[in-house]
Amino acid sequence: MTEKIWNQNLYDLFEQNFPILNRPFIEKPDGGILTYGYMKKMTGIFSNALDSLGVTIGDRVIVQTNKSPEVVFLYLACLKTGAIFVPLNTAYTQSELEYFISDSDPKVVICDPKSPIINYQLTEHHPDAHLYTMDINGNGSFTKYAESYPETFVTVPGDGTDIACILYTSGTTGQPKGAMLTHSNLGSNAITLRDAWGFTSDDTLLHVLPIFHAHGLFVAINTVLVNGTGMIFLPKFEVDEVCRLIPKTSVMMGVPTFYTRLLANEKFTRNLSQNMRLFVSGSAPLLAETHREFSQRTGHEILERYGMTETAMNTSNPLKGIRIPGSVGPALPGIEVRVVNQEEKILGVNETGDIHVRGPNVFNGYWKKPDKTLEEFCEDNFFRTGDLGYLDDKGYLFIVGRAKDLIISGGYNVYPKEIESCLDEINGIQESAVIGVPHKDFGEAVVAIVTYDKEKNLITEQDVIVLLKKVLASYKVPKAVFFVPDIPRNVMGKVEKTKLRKTYNQTFEE
Ligand code: MLC
Ligand code: AMP
């Protein structure tokens, strides 16, 4: 593909690939069909509504809603108007949300009627901002407001360098950072994936991922849109629903938990997936064992790929050719991957080091954090991923660990530092260390080890969990809390997490 194709407003790129407008874009779980024509109409209406609120190029639109087709139309309307789409996980608590609002300084916030944002005095802090609602059915004050606006809206022109989305990712230190992705970052990656994964006009995607993160939004929806085909759109992953609908689809994308949950259910048979062309896994390591078990059960080899919020997708096992269990495959076309040592010298075949990536997919930097951006990029523009791995003699990448202190639970990232800071605020807790341990369902589960002052306060595991749930999204809250007299530290005073992982490794083993 030539660069020209994606150096434009992403909506224009999608529109060039629209099929005839009566073709299905979204099929709802009840069988209701929303065509490309309907999507185009609703996107135009939402674009005019945003425009009437004064939204212009570069303004942030925060969306914290449950998954519905209308959220997709809202995303497309942001692209069309040049606004920056800022999706937020529905699990975030009020304090987490206040940070995102304050950092991104939005022009419009659209949230679920049950979101804690409703209680936030938005205009007190952001006098020009507007707050609207949208519920799981796509109804709410925004949809109502938009109703009377016309269907046509001229997409703002662009050369692809404008920011299309800001997605927040946490960090090993400090607060979450907004990764700024341009229209061409996303356009180039969508085209690359469509071609690498052999999408054709016969494909239908089974969409079961949340759409506030890179996987469900960029990998799944953008790829479908540049392919001009449709998807069955489920509000969330649920095994029975997936089994019911899988025979009507040809491609599914998921985190490893989806595949282990399917395997754990005997309804999920070879017969059921015989129309499927491709199962894709990513966001967390897929165990080689799961890959093999899946292939025995269904005859399909899951295709594992590797990406990040900051880069969208970097590598992928091939569609045709050998898919190696435990590897995330070679670099995708147009993307470079290298492995370096601590002095940033390029390492040879099978040597483990830091993974760097460079390509048109790599983001533009962190929102309002130029220093952080500089830190993460090498002089020659390679991005330091924070992942550790090696390349084999065929160029296949194997991820063996992370230089960053990060836990990935069911595909969601949890940064121990953030949980430790919240634990340290709890009256009576003196010290804390948070680690990830193996978990059958989530891959890794969050576990906290704490010391506390018995004189001061008598607290239980349950107390800690209840207190943390007030301030942290519940997927970040430890699944177990251990009270210990001391937390092991090395001579430099650093917590010995490797030792802790060894001690607590078996916590969830049956
Ligand atoms: C839910 N819970 C989790 C959890 N998901 N706990 C730990 N880890 C998780 N991932 C907790 C809830 O907080 C709740 O706790 C309880 O489990 C039930 O919640 P639920 O909503 O009913 O859970 P469920 O529907 O079973 O969700 C599990 C899941 C979901 C695996 C389907 O987490 C999911 O869809 N994950 C996908 C994440 C994803 O899209 N990642 C992509 C990031 S992008 P309690 O205590 O309140 O009962 C990226 C880049 C790339 O990484 O490469 O793709
Ligand atoms: P996020 O910040 O949510 O985008 O998460 C990105 C991180 O997920 C990467 O830096 C990796 O650590 C991890 N990741 C994504 N895909 C894979 C994969 N296939 N195997 C192992 N880790 C992965």
Image (cartoon, rainbow, N blue to C red):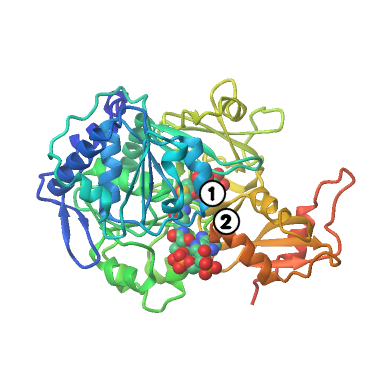
Q: Residue furthest front?
A: 124
Residue 57 placement: quadrant: top left
Residue displayed at 59% across by 20% down: 379
Q: Sequence-wise, which precedes: disc 2 or disc 1?
A: 1
- The amino acid type found where label 2 is placed reads Leu
Q: Nearer the viewer, residue 44 or 131?
A: 131
Quarter of the image containing the C terminus?
Answer: bottom right
Residue 234 image point, x, y percent: 31, 62
Residue 20 placement: quadrant: top left
- In this rendering, position of residue 141 left or right of residue 488: left
- In this rendering, position of residue 503 left or right of residue 390: right
Q: Residues within 10 Å of mark 1 (few under 14, many from 20)?
A: some
Kindly check if marks 2 and 1 are in contact, taking CB atoms under 8 A apart as contact: yes
Q: Which residue is mark 1?
A: 96
Q: Which residue is mark 2?
A: 472
| Position above or below: 493 against 82 | below
Residue displayed at 46% across by 32% down: 362
Residue displayed at 18% across by 47% down: 39
